[in-house]
């Protein structure tokens, strides 16, 4: 009897420890495996694999048409992948339970909100759905707006509306934020405010953020890692710092040379102003020079060129 | 959460509902005055004959008000959420899609029913003061399908607004117009009191009620979400 009681308690404790361990080990907030999707026969993603660990801020970058919106739609649960799986907190993204939805804050392109409501009404409405609702966070951002609570969202500018939406998402205290092109329609001041608030929010409490933006500059202030999508579904993931440090641009004078071609050590080649070529590569100058020589192009005059993150992004994905 | 969902729906429709309530109140007054005028202008036997045998009514103004009101109410309620992909906001609320949509439809249908109840009460009470019970019943039976047309118009417009494809909208338009027409077509006095007709009417409305749920689940995973 005593042994049985002892065993029972021990088993319960083991179970609790096992559950805690499982939760602790569930590091992948987002888990994408073998994701495939296509529209009218045009393949957008073919076997995409991607994990996002808890506490990471990940930026999704890519030119228009490479599948960013498709991936975001799948992640947000508004599109079912043709094949493969996309899990958010261990559940298929297109069939999240209400409990899991409370842990996910979504920001839609264009800062969508119930614009028929006033500031006070929208807070009252959303607060009923989220058990961890934090009024202070919402009120803090609304105080900055300087608008009365009776102000209708329909009558706000895009920037003001973005603040309301951000306040609503923060007040939900989500564990995961998915932001679809938050910068669209915002002027520099509102964008900076948005980014600063978001950066602080993301870094407290190990929140996970997955975002897209057309403003590459913001990524430097926000993200830990980049996912770079290219046409055909190729995805490359790397820490932002590694991309900044390792991806380089070299300038090669034109001077009647035949255009170098991408391949091997050379990631991409673009014709720049003044007849020069810009060569983008993850390799050192010597290796690039060797690759050029091997391709029959004289590397004479090859010189490294400093570039911004936006230059690097355009160099990586290619111009249109 | 359910209360919050109802409240959100009410915020959208309250102005339209007040306007519709005023229109129905005015129409009710018109119907009462028209009935009094008929009795003042003709012998009561003649008015009774017209009501009992010919099926004439003094509330013809209520033939088109319910379906027009149903359309207006559906637009006021659902357009704010179906334009610009705003349906995504509701689809991401931590409730099931069925629950969110049930609250939405329940409020819209409830308000249509309130307006219908007002019309039936006004017509019933004014008729009861002048006619025997059989004629009062026949008059209410004449009004009921027009009110049902209001529910059909509300459900049809709701389905149209949630439907993701143009072809689907065209088909739903035909279906909804057909159902509303069934209720609006001239019928012999007392025809809608027949159990078969009553069953047909209720079945049509029940079938239309299911369509918005199908439309939203069809479009939920298209990535378009209106």
Image (cartoon, coloured by chain):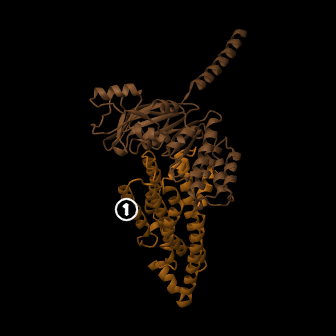
Chain colours: A brown, B orange
Res A254 quadrant in image = top left
- Establish if B88 lies above or below A282: below
Residue A13 left/right relative to A238: right
- The quarter of the displayed image where residue A34 is located: top left
Name the quadrant of the N terminus of chain A. Answer: top right
Q: Who is closer to the viewer here, A266 or A89? A: A266
Q: Residue furthest right?
A: A2
Residue at the (34%, 31%) spot, across then down? A300
Name the residue located 36 percent from the left edge and 60 percent from the top edge: B170
Q: Is residue A94 above or below residue A53?
A: below
The percent coordinates of residue B145 (x first, y second) are 48, 67
* Horizontal arrangement in the rendering, residue B205 relative to residue A208 (left or right): left
Q: Position of residue A78 (x, y in %)?
A: 46, 44
A18 vs A75, nearest the viewer: A75
Which residue is denoted by mark 1 in the rendering? B174
- In the image, B127 versus A310, the foreground residue is A310
Question: Disc 1 is attached to a residue of which chain?
Answer: B
What is the quadrant of the C terminus of chain A in the image? top left
When asked about the image quadrant of residue A6, the answer is top right
Whether residue B146 sits left or right of residue B115 in the image: it is left
SS class, disc 1: helix
Write the residue at 46% across / 62% down.
Answer: B152
Whether residue A160 is visible: yes
Image spot of residue A126 (x, y percent): 63, 49
How far from the left and from the top, in percent, is residue B222?
42, 46
Mark 1 nearby-residue class (10 Å; few <14, some 14–19, many ≥20):
few
């Amino acid at each position: 009897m005593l042994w049985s009681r002892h065993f029972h308690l021990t088993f319960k404790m083991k179970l609790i420890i096992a559950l805690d361990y499982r939760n602790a080990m569930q590091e992948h907030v987002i888990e994408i495996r073998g994701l495939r999707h296509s529209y009218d026969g045009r393949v957008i993603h073919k076997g995409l694999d991607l994990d996002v660990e808890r506490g990471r801020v990940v930026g999704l970058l890519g030119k228009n048409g490479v599948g960013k919106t498709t991936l975001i739609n799948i992640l947000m649960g508004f599109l079912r992948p043709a094949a493969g799986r996309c899990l958010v907190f261990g559940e298929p993204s297109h069939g999240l339970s209400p409990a899991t939805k409370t842990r996910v804050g979504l920001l839609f392109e264009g800062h969508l909100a119930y614009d028929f409501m006033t500031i006070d009404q929208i807070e009252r409405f959303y607060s009923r759905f989220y058990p961890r609702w934090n009024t202070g966070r919402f009120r803090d951002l609304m105080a900055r707006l300087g608008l009365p609570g009776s102000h209708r969202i329909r009558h706000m500018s895009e920037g003001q509306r973005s603040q309301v939406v951000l306040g609503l998402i923060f007040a939900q205290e989500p564990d995961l934020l998915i932001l679809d092109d938050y910068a669209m329609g915002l002027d520099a001041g509102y964008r900076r405010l948005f980014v600063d608030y978001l950066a602080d929010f993301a870094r407290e409490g190990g929140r996970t953020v997955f975002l897209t933006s057309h403003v590459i500059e913001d990524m430097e202030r926000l993200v830990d890692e980049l996912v770079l999508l290219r046409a055909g579904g190729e995805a490359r993931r790397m820490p932002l710092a590694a991309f900044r440090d390792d991806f380089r641009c070299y300038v090669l004078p034109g001077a009647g040379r035949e255009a170098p071609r991408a391949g091997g050590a050379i990631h991409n080649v673009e014709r720049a102003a003044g007849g020069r070529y810009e060569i983008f590569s993850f390799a050192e100058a010597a290796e690039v020079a060797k690759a050029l020589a091997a391709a029959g192009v004289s590397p004479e005059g090859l010189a490294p060129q400093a570039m911004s993150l936006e230059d690097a992004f355009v160099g990586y994905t290619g111009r249109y | 959460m359910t209360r919050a969902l109802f409240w959100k729906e009410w915020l959208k429709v309250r102005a339209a509902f007040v306007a519709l309530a005023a229109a129905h109140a005015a129409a009710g007054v018109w119907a009462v005055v028209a009935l009094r005028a008929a009795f003042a202008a003709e012998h009561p036997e003649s008015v009774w004959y017209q009501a009992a045998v010919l099926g004439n009514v003094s509330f013809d103004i209520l033939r088109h008000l319910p379906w027009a009101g149903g359309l207006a109410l559906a637009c006021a309620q659902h357009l704010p959420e179906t334009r610009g992909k705003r349906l995504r906001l509701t689809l991401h609320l931590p409730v099931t899609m069925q629950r969110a949509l049930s609250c939405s439809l329940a409020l819209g249908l409830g308000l249509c029913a309130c307006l219908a109840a007002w019309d039936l009460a006004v017509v019933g009470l004014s008729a009861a003061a002048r006619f025997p019970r059989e004629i009062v019943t026949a008059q209410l039976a004449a009004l009921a399908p027009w009110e049902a047309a209001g529910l059909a118009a509300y459900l049809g417009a709701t389905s149209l607004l949630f439907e993701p494809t143009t072809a689907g909208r065209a088909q739903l338009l035909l279906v909804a117009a057909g159902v509303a027409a069934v209720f609006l077509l001239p019928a012999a006095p007392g025809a809608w009191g027949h159990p078969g007709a009553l069953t047909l009417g209720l079945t049509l409305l029940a079938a239309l009620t299911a369509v918005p749920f199908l439309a939203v689940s069809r479009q939920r995973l298209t990535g378009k979400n209106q």
